[in-house]
Image (cartoon, rainbow, N blue to C red):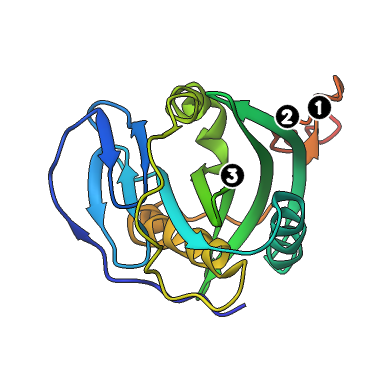
Amino acid sequence: MAIVVFLIIFSVQFVGAYDNAAHGFSINFPSGWEQTQNPDVVVLYINDDGSASINIIVEETSASLADYVAASKTQLADLDYYELISEKSRTIGGLGGYELVYAWTLYDGGDSYDLQDKQVFFVQNGKAYIITCGADYYEYDAVLPTFEQTLESFRLTQTGTPATLNSNLIVGAIVIAVIVVLAIAIVVLRRRKRQPTQRQYDSTGTGTLYPPPPPPPPPP
């Protein structure tokens, strides 16, 4: 799959609370994370070493939440080594939504990067709100509490103005959101090259992923 790497311009802004009156939502981003400017998302924050990010996209849609999520899953299934880890309905601040957690491998030239994303979808007042939390696959569990605190702070504040992002498909924002998360991974994690591995589930059945164990030592 062709990956477009966007030019990312960093602006150092260290804020917790974020309010977007135009799109009618508020959210508390992690303290110390940097806001990154990108024209294809409403807002994007990354952590200090660039191995994790959170972005939000808003787009107009006539689809229901169920239809939007179904179409999004179809798009995401085209990713390399895609694995859907979990999915469930989710309510945040009284607003009903849906959550997908998945892992996949990004290839960039001769390099590969294992990544894990959590996306939460809301459809309200003719708009889809998509929050994407992405991280290096091997660091996802460590940053997950931060992702959860941010997600739980999301609120709709008002109707807002119509979405202005260019999108003719109801899932156009999903593809863009994934590419932006991975553009950061390409730029920052290039120094941490990994070969693709077979991701496995643990024996508890919780869906937690872990790297395969090392091979046994040779016999004496």
Proximity of marks 1 and 2: CB atoms separated by less than 8 Å:
yes
Q: Which amino acid does label 2 sit on?
A: Thr
Q: Where is residue 198 in the image (x, y as percent from the top left)?
A: 76, 49
Residue 198 in sight in this render = no
| Pick the front one: 165 or 73 | 165
Mark 3 and mark 2: Cα distance apart in space: 25 Å
Few, some or many residues within 10 Å of mark 1 (<14, 14–19, 20+): few
Image quarter (top left, top right, bottom left or bottom right) of the C terminus: top right
Q: What residue type is labelled 3?
A: Phe
Q: Which mark is residue 122?
A: 3
Badge 3 or badge 2: first in the primary sequence: 3
From the image, tell me which residue sits under label 2.
208
Q: What residue type is labelled 1?
A: Asp
Q: What element carries label 1?
A: loop
Few, some or many residues within 10 Å of mark 2 (<14, 14–19, 20+): some
Q: Which residue lies at the image location 56% right of the left edge and 70% below the top edge?
A: 172
Total tally of numbered discs in the picture: 3
Q: Which residue lies at the image location 55% right of the left edge and 79% below the top edge?
A: 168
Badge 3 or badge 1: first in the primary sequence: 3
Q: What element carries label 2?
A: loop
Q: Position of residue 142 (x, y in %)?
A: 50, 25
From the image, tell me which residue sits under label 1.
202
Q: Which residue lies at the image location 32% right of the left edge and 32% below the top edge?
A: 29
Q: What element carries label 3?
A: strand
